[in-house]
Image (cartoon, rainbow, N blue to C red):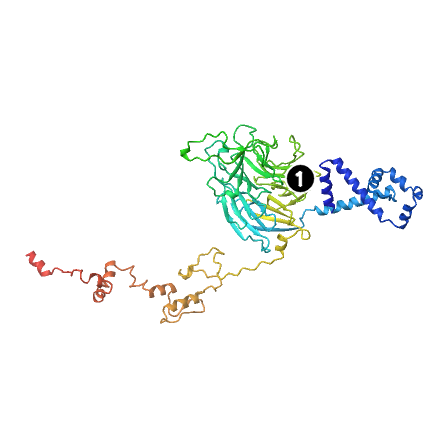
């Protein structure tokens, strides 16, 4: 209740600090009057006899105290004839105690949910982007290896495993993921030129069009001509998506026309050039009402465009079309090159503006830069920031900045320093403009989001060794999400197959016994088992046994077992074909082949000529 009253007073004050102080003072007086309304019988009696008031000094003390005249005017306006009976000191004590209680209650409601922590592992690369739908049932996390993991909190167990894993564009790192207002789709931007739209189950619904890299004028291309760096869904319109790219433009898309021959591009936003040459739009952000679109440029500026208005002109104006015989369609999208707000020199030149975020009232903008700074901007003052925070190192272009659900805090992640502090998530107070909390993480903190419904903080972390997603929550104040999953025990997986890749051993059952590896779950064979296996092939031989000295004896003839086996298989001795003459080894089968030509009978029985040898007598006659 104290938080709701504070919000109502801030809204009524309209940003005026003096008016806010008067409203707080009035609230304290009303609380004091409510306390006096329940006074005891003696106070009621004094109200009935006004002449007695002067003796106690109640009225005089109250009217001379600060705020007494204001209370009397307010009481007269309400028609309340009752007057205070407590002294000024007592009323101030009551008001101060009420204020302290309200502050304690206010701090308790705005507490950061970091009493418990859960870890979602299994990432080979750093987790660079985290997106959760508004209902808090689905989460999509992208990593720098181009893999997106989808989590369903309703069916999640305490092992925190994703129900599906998809690769958006193989070989391209993930830069941004954002859900639609209805939660049935999400957009994913990787290092590719064409961001993609997926259903809540991860099925790809389509991709945005690709522009022509040889066209210099960005308003005449139907898509990005370079890698996409960021993507944000309109928080009000479920059919509009904004993307930023390294071609120096931001583009609005209508997902209802995905796959249309004329393209789904809705508008082109071209920032003003602070210096000559092409620039990169490294990040983009929507205001909570969807009226403003902010873009972070690597020339050091932040430019804010209106999402609708008279600034948008048709991109076909001034375009020289080719002859109609070529069937060239004109540009059906609009074009805007006039930002409504321009923050010049917001950050150093050639530094990436990694992220930006609007407050819910739209009066404050926070921007994160790759040079290790975070700036707080007042939308009514474009010249200099309200506060500049330094010493926030980061080496990732996806490091984001975000707000708490009630806009009391804004937070960002930092990387670990070699000789300094460890990585972590830093929380800053909007009212005091100072750091109030730092939650350390074992890996570099890149992406972070605080879900308003779950009251849980999701942090994407990672380094060269791998990545993970850490979840901060309060078991008493957080709802749903990982709180339910912690109490669900995951079932043990029972496999019917043996794992043969545990020790990276190649199992070859037909190899020689000396080189065979035992299969998992089986006893290793000894010399006796090997001898028994050999006897199964030759059951007629004598049994082989081992003597007391451990030497095999029996049917081997005092020879080694290997020699015995090779001799029986005609691999040793006179029958070994390797030691015989090749011609003799072949001719020894000639007599048997002539008697039983089972292999050559059908092929050569009718066609094979009969050999005719010359006799010796004919040779002698010729010699004479």
Circle 1 packing at 10 Å, graded few (<14), some (14-19), many (20+), is few
Left or right: 91 in relation to 104: right
Q: Outermost residue toward the left?
A: 624
Compared with residue 122, is residue 231 higher up or lower down, i.e. above or below? above
Q: Outermost residue toward the top?
A: 276
For disc 1, the marked residue is 361
* Residue at image point 78% right, 38% down: 22
Is residue 224 or residue 395 the one in the foreground? Answer: 224
Is residue 451 or residue 64 the one in the foreground? Answer: 64
Q: Quarter holding the C terminus?
A: bottom left
Report x, y in % for residue 302.
Answer: 60, 33
Report x, y in % for residue 511.
Answer: 40, 60
Quadrant assignment, res 69: top right
Q: How many marks?
A: 1
Report x, y in % for residue 364.
Answer: 66, 37
Compared with residue 83, is residue 607 higher up or lower down, i.e. above or below? below
Q: Is residue 439 visible?
A: yes
Quadrant assignment, res 429: top right
Q: Is residue 123 visible?
A: no
Say which element carries label 1.
Answer: loop
Report x, y in % for residue 449.
Answer: 62, 45
Is residue 296 or residue 305 the one in the foreground? Answer: 305
Compared with residue 311, is residue 92 higher up or lower down, i.e. above or below? below
């Amino acid at each position: 209740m104290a938080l709701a009253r504070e919000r109502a007073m801030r809204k009524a004050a309209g940003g005026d600090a003096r008016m806010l102080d008067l409203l707080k003072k009035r609230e304290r007086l009303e609380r004091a009057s409510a306390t006096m309304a329940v006074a005891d019988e003696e106070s009621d009696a004094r109200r009935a006899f006004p002449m007695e008031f002067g003796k106690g000094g109640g009225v005089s003390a109250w009217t001379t105290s600060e705020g007494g005249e204001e209370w009397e005017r307010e009481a007269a306006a309400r028609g309340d004839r009752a007057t205070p009976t407590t002294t000024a000191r007592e009323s101030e004590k009551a008001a101060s105690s009420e204020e302290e209680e309200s502050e304690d209650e206010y701090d308790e409601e705005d507490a950061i949910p970091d009493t418990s922590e859960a870890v979602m592992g299994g990432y080979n690369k750093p987790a660079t982007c985290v997106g959760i739908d508004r209902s808090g049932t689905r989460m999509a996390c992208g990593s720098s290896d181009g893999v997106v993991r989808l989590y369903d909190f309703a069916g999640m167990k305490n092992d925190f495993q994703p129900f599906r894993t998809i690769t958006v564009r193989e070989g391209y790192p993930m830069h941004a993921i954002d859900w639609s207002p209805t939660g049935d789709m999400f957009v994913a931007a990787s290092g590719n030129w064409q961001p993609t739209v997926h259903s809540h189950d991860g099925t790809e619904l389509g991709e945005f069009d690709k522009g022509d890299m040889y066209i210099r004028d960005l308003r005449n291309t139907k898509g990005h001509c370079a890698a996409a760096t960021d993507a944000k869904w309109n928080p009000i319109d479920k059919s509009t998506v904004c993307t930023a790219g390294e071609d120096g433009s931001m583009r609005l898309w209508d997902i209802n026309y995905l796959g249309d021959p004329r393209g789904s591009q809705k508008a082109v936003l071209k920032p003003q050039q602070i210096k000559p040459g092409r620039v990169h739009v490294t990040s983009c952000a929507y205001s909570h009402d969807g009226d403003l679109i902010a873009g972070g440029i690597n020339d050091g500026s932040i430019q804010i465009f209106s999402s609708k208005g008279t600034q948008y002109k048709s991109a076909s104006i001034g375009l020289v079309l080719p002859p109609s015989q070529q069937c060239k369609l004109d540009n059906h999208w609009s074009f805007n090159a006039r930002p409504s707000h321009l923050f010049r020199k917001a950050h150093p030149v050639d530094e990436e503006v990694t992220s930006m975020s609007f407050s819910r009232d739209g009066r404050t903008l926070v921007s994160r830069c790759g040079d290790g700074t975070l700036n707080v901007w007042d939308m009514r003052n474009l010249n200099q920031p309200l506060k500049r925070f330094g010493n926030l190192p980061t080496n990732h272009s996806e490091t984001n900045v975000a707000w708490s659900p009630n806009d009391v805090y804004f937070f960002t992640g930092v990387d670990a320093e070699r000789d300094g502090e460890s990585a972590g998530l830093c929380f800053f107070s909007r009212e005091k403009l100072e750091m109030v909390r730092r939650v350390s993480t074992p890996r570099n903190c890149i992406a972070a989001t605080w879900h308003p419904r779950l009251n849980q903080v999701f942090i994407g972390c990672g380094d060269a060794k791998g990545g993970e997603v850490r979840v901060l929550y309060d078991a008493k104040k957080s709802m749903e999400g990982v709180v339910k999953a912690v109490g669900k025990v995951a079932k043990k997986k029972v496999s019917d197959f043996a794992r043969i890749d545990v020790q990276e051993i190649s199992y070859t059952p037909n190899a020689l016994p000396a080189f065979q590896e035992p299969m998992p779950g089986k006893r290793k064979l000894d010399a006796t088992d090997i001898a028994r296996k050999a006897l199964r092939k030759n059951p007629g031989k004598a049994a082989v046994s081992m003597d007391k000295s451990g030497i095999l004896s029996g049917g081997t003839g005092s020879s080694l077992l290997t020699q015995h086996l090779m001799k029986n298989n005609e691999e040793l001795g006179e029958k070994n074909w390797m030691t015989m003459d090749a011609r003799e080894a072949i001719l020894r089968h000639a007599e048997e082949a002539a008697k039983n030509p089972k292999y050559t009978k059908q092929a050569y029985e009718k066609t094979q000529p009969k050999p005719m040898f010359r006799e010796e007598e004919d040779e002698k006659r010729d010699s004479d």
